[in-house]
Amino acid sequence: MERAVLLQTEPTGRKLGILRNFSEEALRQANWMLTRRTDRSSKRLQDKTYRQVKESTGFQAQVMCDLSQSVARSKGGHLNGITVKFNVPRNCKTFKTKEFFFVELGMYPRNRLAVPIRKNRNLDRFFGLLGNAWTCKTYGLTPSLDIVAFLSKEEPPLVPLRNVLGIDINNKNFAYSVLTPKGKVLEQGYLGQQIWPKKVHFSERRALLQSLNALKKLKRMRHLQRDFVRTNIGQMVREIILIAKRFEADISIERLGRFSPKGRRFNKRVMTIPFFLFKRILQARCFDNGITLNRVDAYHTSKWCTHCGAVGKGHDGGNYSLFRCRECGQIVSADRKASLAVAVKCLLERGGIPYQNTLQISSRRVPVNGLVRSGSDAPGPMAVPMLVRGRGKPTASVVGS
């Protein structure tokens, strides 16, 4: 598990000038290296540029190697800023005095600069993580001349909890379902209903400001929207962790990849879903609370009927919020049904559960291609098709309603 903590600096005027000159020179060299890049290989880029960068800048060898790796992974043809990394103990070290905590950066072979860190909540959080078995072997100088500490900690083996909390992520709210291995639904609900109306307000306000060419207000609006989304995502993750602890449940989300283009309106809605931010915060909080975070394949979670097990076309015509099964006629909330399917699939993919005590409740037909992909089509670990009690052919177990 990895985590980054931003530490604000309080350098003197002389040290501030040295840091600024070093950061600007590193950015110039990174953009020059970007013009020499032909592929994503950092090794080939380093072979092409190492000697010239060494002669023109005199940077430490470790700094130049990290620059080439960052440039090789970067996207686009120009960099507006770059974080220069320093490894401990070869090129960086820390020490304390009575007043300050210092991070000493080895920018040049015979030139080290001790940067004082401001005393605030970020520094307290950094020391708290170090006291909780986290280690920091890399520090970085950001374009804003602050220090970012990259911490790591080995993930201990976790014992899977009995119940599963499945979460379905969509553009208007997040639905969740708590499920037992025997198929009993303990609780269902929604989170984040306040995000969508606010996002619509931001979108309408941004369109108005763009028509007026109010660039400063547009920039401020962008920061307000970013802070609003991050704050509400953090609050939702906190509620999810509390629900998981209350029901002693592991958490399961879909393993989503890139969406295929399906029209301008659909793409605009999908791209506003903060899935990556939500997953990153949830992963960190699950690690802190000893909860297993499972990622299941999203195959047919929105098309599978929880009552008869049939796979249909998904949503009910133009009503995106409802799911209608054409086999048995069940009409349910599409989001809550999808969250239930995520929980069911997590239990199917989980190892060590006796087949005879799993989820088969429905007496209707259940196709093998309902929730579990067969053979090599599955991107991750899949459940073995089970023999349904009282029936002679193998099928994937599902939950009944």
Image: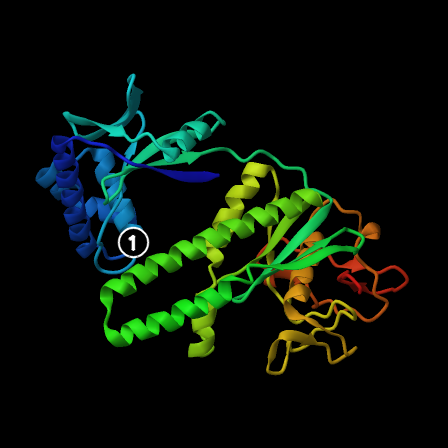
- Residue located at (65% from left, 70% from top): 334
Q: Residue 172's image quarter?
A: bottom right
Q: Colour scheme in the image?
A: rainbow
Q: Residue 310's image quarter?
A: bottom right
Q: Where is residue 112 drawn, in percent x and y?
A: 18, 26
Secondary structure of the residue carrying numbered label 1? loop
Q: Where is residue 194 drawn, in percent x and y?
A: 52, 62
Q: Is residue 114 positioned above or below 326 on the image?
A: above
Q: Which residue position holds label 1?
A: 74
Q: Is residue 182 left or right of residue 302?
A: right
- Give the residue type at disc 1: Ser
Q: Residue furthest right?
A: 390
Q: Residue furthest bottom?
A: 317
Q: Is residue 90 visible?
A: no
Q: Residue 201's image quarter?
A: bottom left
Q: Residues within 10 Å of mark 1 (few under 14, many from 20)?
A: some
Q: Where is residue 68 drawn, in percent x and y?
A: 25, 45
Q: Where is residue 268 drawn, in percent x and y?
A: 43, 72
Q: Is residue 356 left or right of residue 11?
A: right
Q: Is residue 102 positioned above or below 160 on the image?
A: above
Q: Is residue 61 left or right of residue 309?
A: left
- Residue located at (27% from left, 41% from top): 66
Q: Is residue 95 positioned above or below 350 on the image?
A: above
Q: Is residue 214 visible?
A: yes
Observer-nearest residue: 122 or 264?
122
Q: Residue furthest top?
A: 98
- Residue located at (24% from left, 47% from top): 82
